[in-house]
Image: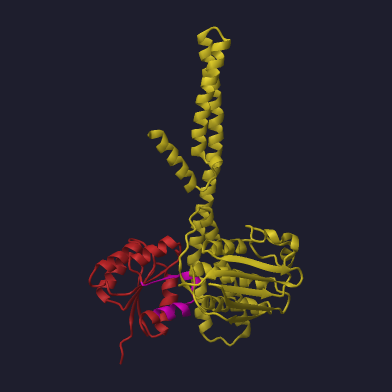
Chain colours: A red, B yellow
Amino acid sequence: MIMAKKILFIEDEPALQTTLGDFLKSGGFSVSTAADGISGLEMAKKEKPDLILLDLILPKKNGFDVLLELKQDPKTVAIPVMVLTNLESAEDIDRALEAGATAYLVKTNYRLEEVMEKVKSLLGK
Amino acid sequence: MPPLIIKFNVFSECRESRLALWECPPFLFVVMGIVNVITAITVYAFAVELVDEPQLAALIVVGVSALIFLIGNFLITGFNKIAEANRLKSEFLNLVSHQLRTPLSVFKWTLELVNHRSHSDAKTANYLNILGEHTERMVRLVNLLLDVSRIEAGRFILQRSPVSLERLTAEALHSLKPYADSSRVTIAFEAKNKRDVRGDVERLRMVIQNLVDNAVRYSSEAGVVSITTAERGGDIEWRINDRGVGIPKAQQKYIFQKFFRATNGVHQQTQGTGLGLYIAQQIVKELGGTIGFESEEGKGSTFWFRLPIYK
């Protein structure tokens, strides 16, 4: 049996954790969630997921800082990070891409199906 | 050269606050200072000529200077308040719109999950469609407001990446389908050219959604809307045609103005902000493209925009 790909979803809004989390699980992924930047970083190092979905406005440590730390740590540098946020100014997008994000999606503008498609293409599935 | 530095800072400060020089408090402050000095010297020259006593002359100079200083101060305070109110309005709009986005994402995704579960009841499906349609409308409205506040704050910076108009149109048609269905409007789409344009994907999504939304909204009952993309001399032209109410000739020149809505449109449809076309024009212009339309009242409208092909 092939192991399900692991996704870490760092998002502080429980309702979004549930909706996208459930949807990804129904697509055959193994999903774990973290509700703030610090626990997100810890889980990323411990679980070594195949993909990280990262919100930018997070309690304790914001998503930009989380992203920078992920990309500085040799243990997590290779994990692709898809930013999933409601910030969408060109400055924020450039800042996230420069910090090493692989993709950037604005939550309100994407359906779950479209998010799943992106996730699959990033995981080469 | 301290005065030059001050002058330079004033100009850049006014540019940053997006105010015309004569509405910009720091500039007015400098002007009032200069006026004050010139007045003091002039009054002194006259006073020395006309009044014998030097103390009286000095008193007149001080009096006039103080008066001018007071008037100037009132003026500048007034303008300062306006500038501050304008800045607060933009910040408020920005904050509220961002705050609205999280619950909107929740609505959108939860509805999608509910729609994925089987429900045999046609009425429920219809209610869910209505909810979905209005959630999408709210998403578009919030996107519009955010961009208006950015344009006003002079922070409207766009991405320049390859964008497939074909894909964006297909996505927009998917999200607007419930609305088109309930309005009994059929949308036909033919991509004659599939090359990418150079642009900002989220903003172009908004332009396309606005134009499709308008075409459906102002279509006559059971109308047909057709969309095509084609190559036009280094550009891709995206074109949408409806057989709706059209725009009265006399009002056509105002159609891209902020908050403007044609009178016959308002009679037909109460909903609409008058911001969609304004934003669409700002976006297309910013990306180095052109936007335009042809319309005849009672017969329909064709809106188009052209953007450079991504190389």
User: Magenta: predominant secondary structure element?
Assistant: helix
Residue B183 relative to residue A77: left or right: right
How far across and down, in percent of the image, does residue A32 sit?
34, 76
Label total for image? 0
- Relative height, residue B147 to residue A81 (above, below): above
Q: Quadrant of residue B268?
A: bottom right
- Which residue corresponds to the image point at 51% horizontal and 58% vertical from the top-left? B96
Instruction: Compare residues B176 and B65 and report the one nearer the observer.
Output: B65
The quadrant of the picture occupied by the N terminus of chain B is top left
Question: Is residue B251 toward the left or the right of residue B211 in the image?
Answer: right
Tell me where residue B135 appears, x and y as whole percent.
Answer: 56, 71
Q: Is residue A118 magenta?
A: yes
Q: Foreground: B253 or A14?
A: B253
Instruction: State which quarter of the image contains the C terminus of chain B.
Output: bottom left
Quarter occupied by residue B7: top left
Residue B310: say if magenta: no
Residue B157 placed where, x, y %? 47, 60
Q: Residue furthest bottom?
A: A1
Does residue B185 lie above or below B81 as drawn? below
Q: Which residues are magenta?
A: A102-119
> Quick one: which residue is furthest to the left in this view?
A74
Residue at x-position 46% and y-position 40%: B10
Picture residue at 50% right of the left edge, 38% below the top: B27
Q: Nearer the viewer, residue B306 or B96?
A: B306
Q: Nearer the viewer, residue B223 or B176?
A: B223
